[in-house]
Image (tube, helix red, strand yellow):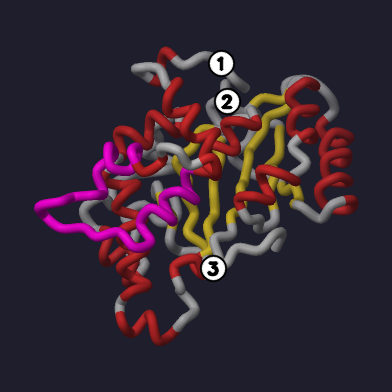
Amino acid sequence: YHGYDPNNVYLGFELEVECFEGNLDSDAERVRNVLEIEQNRGYLKYDGSLNHGFEIVSQPHTLAEFQEHFPFEVIKNLQQTGYRSWDTDTCGFHVHVSKSAFGWNNRARIQEGRVEAHAIRFLKLIYDNDRYVRRLAGRSSDQWASFDDKRAIIPKVRHGRQANSRYSAVNVSNPDTFEVRVFKGSMRVARILANLEFVHACVEYTRKLSVSPNNNTLQWPFFRKWLTGKPEYANLTTLLGNLPRSRSAESEEN
């Protein structure tokens, strides 16, 4: 773990990249030296869904550690060498958030139902606003990040039932993390940070949220208003303000 968060909100990401230019083996070794050996910030793995690339996996970090200390220059260097993520058909970006952020390891709170309630609010914020989340994520993929569980959030959280196994918009099957799988792969640091900030913001927004049929604070406008004036979510706020009216109009960003 890198950094300390009193609320136990630790994040990790998986970024898939494809090699269109350069030498895959030597480039992977260079990135591995920085992430694994020099800084112990992450590691690489190969994924069968990629044509000619690899997956960059971070260690758990606080949001502030990602913003201030993660060696994103390794990703910038790959992009300059000719690697791509955004303009491919194979690459995604996944964000893991620790279940401990929801008090998952606290037996007393689980018995009281508070843990499940927070997790349910977290998932519902994402699933109930799927139209907005897809625009933010840059893609809509029923194959890799399905929203089919939209009307079955409670059994999904409580019993781990998922319509599309781990290929859900939020995968709950990992023992220690929720995995938000919705994002299109990107090598732009501002976009990567915006994705991490989005997941973090969803956790914090829903932490003590009061929801009722007459005041559905899980609607997107309430969330957008809550983000206002919070500097820790600056990349997310900027991205949301600059999104085009349709994903097809979005410019290439690699």
Q: Picture coordinates of residue 211 (x, y %)?
A: 21, 58
Residue kind at label 3, given as amino acid type: Asp
Q: Marks 1 and 2: in contact by CB < 8 Å? A: yes
Element type at marker 2? loop
Q: Marks 1 and 3: in contact by CB < 8 Å? A: no
- Give the quarter of the figure containing the C terminus: top right
Label located before the other in sequence (3 or 1): 3
Reading the image, the residue beneath label 3 is 176
Reading the image, the residue beneath label 1 is 252
Rendered residue at 45%/33% (across/down)? 137
Examine the image and state in which quarter residue 189 appears: top right
Q: Is residue 106 left or right of residue 146?
A: right
Label located before the other in sequence (3 or 2): 2
Q: CA distance from mark 2 to mark 1?
A: 7 Å
Q: Which residues are magenta?
A: 198-225
Q: CA distance from mark 3 to mark 2?
A: 28 Å
